[in-house]
Amino acid sequence: MIVSLLSFFFMIRHCSSLTDSRYDHQLNQSALDSWQFAGATWYGSPGGFGSDGGACGYGDAVGKPPYSSMVAAGNYNLFHSGEGCGACYQVRVDDVRASVECRPGGPDTISNAVVVERAYPWALCWHVIRIIQVKCTNNPLCSGNAVRVTIADECPGGPCVAESVHFDLSGTAFGALALPGKANQLLSAGVLQVQYIRVPCNYGGYRMAFHVDGGSTPEYFAVVVEFEYGDGDLSGIDLKQQGSSEWVPMRHSWGAVWQFNSGGGPLRAPFSLRLTSYTSHTSIVAGGVIPADWRPGVTYYA
């Protein structure tokens, strides 16, 4: 079997604390040294964004930039009871069994052996990011190009429970795996065997977005983290009120929705939010991101 290397590049980055409005890219890299195997289907309309709303709570934001309908519903091992919301993956259609090992101080190697499944070995601060592309060989309709998707929903049944990892892609994302002009034919292919790899979330000029839930009041604050640069997923959010030095944990409500109840008097805005990654356990701070005159239903960017 001939493995064709279409692209291979290295970028070295350093973890840094993101505070106030200065957001540098950070991500303690996951298994960027190996592609894993999964199944993939699609749902919703052929050119759509899957579900309007979804189990992450993003609503119709998934059909707009920066998501632009390139989203997926994940099964339990991707969704993680909502803490996997916002994680980014590259997905490709391929039956090439290629494994890549990162060897510190030495070249990366590519073999034709079957990929060894292993847990994500979260690295130290310094890390190497590598992206490897291999030609598509198992379906004449696929382009061989990987597509990047964000977990925005949960797939709790059907083929999603039959496999350890399964992506239920939006129609747009599924069709993007096809050769030009072949999207409609690929949509009829049923369950595809794909390869996936965890990648940093990069939304161009966008960094983070916080949509204040419509039910928020002066005493109760709930927010949907619509997207987050870097790791993308969350295990916790802490809130700090104006004039306080104390970080108070918010409660995970569902999906990407987090809430805080003062238990009495009105909350004191502006609020700073500290986000902790589900993946790398690193934290970033959005200082004063929710202004003093915040309103329910409004999205605030950092």
Image (tube, helix red, strand yellow):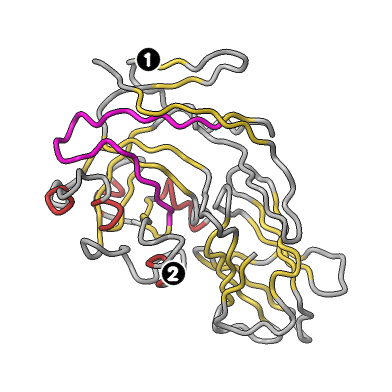
Residue depicted at x 20% and y 29%: 137
User: Is residue 153 depicted above or below 260 in this figure?
Assistant: above
Q: Which residues are magenta?
A: 129-151
How busy is the neighbourhood of tag 2: few (under 14 within 10 Å), some, or many (20 plus)? some
Q: Which amino acid is tagged 2?
A: Ala
Q: First in sequence: mark 1 or mark 2?
A: 2
34 with respect to 69 (left or right): right
Q: Secondary structure at mark 2?
A: helix
Q: Which amino acid is tagged 1?
A: Ser
Quadrant of the rendering where the C terminus is positioned: bottom right
Which residue lies under the disc numbered 1?
A: 111
Residue depicted at x 73% and y 43%: 16
70 with respect to 56 (left or right): left
What percent of the width, then of the height, locates residue 140? 14, 36
User: Is residue 65 depicted above or below 108 in this figure?
Assistant: below
Which of the numbered marks, if any, corresponds to residue 61? 2
Choose between 208 and 247: the one closer to the eye.
208
Quadrant of the rendering where the N terminus is positioned: top left
Q: Image quadrant of residue 195? A: top left
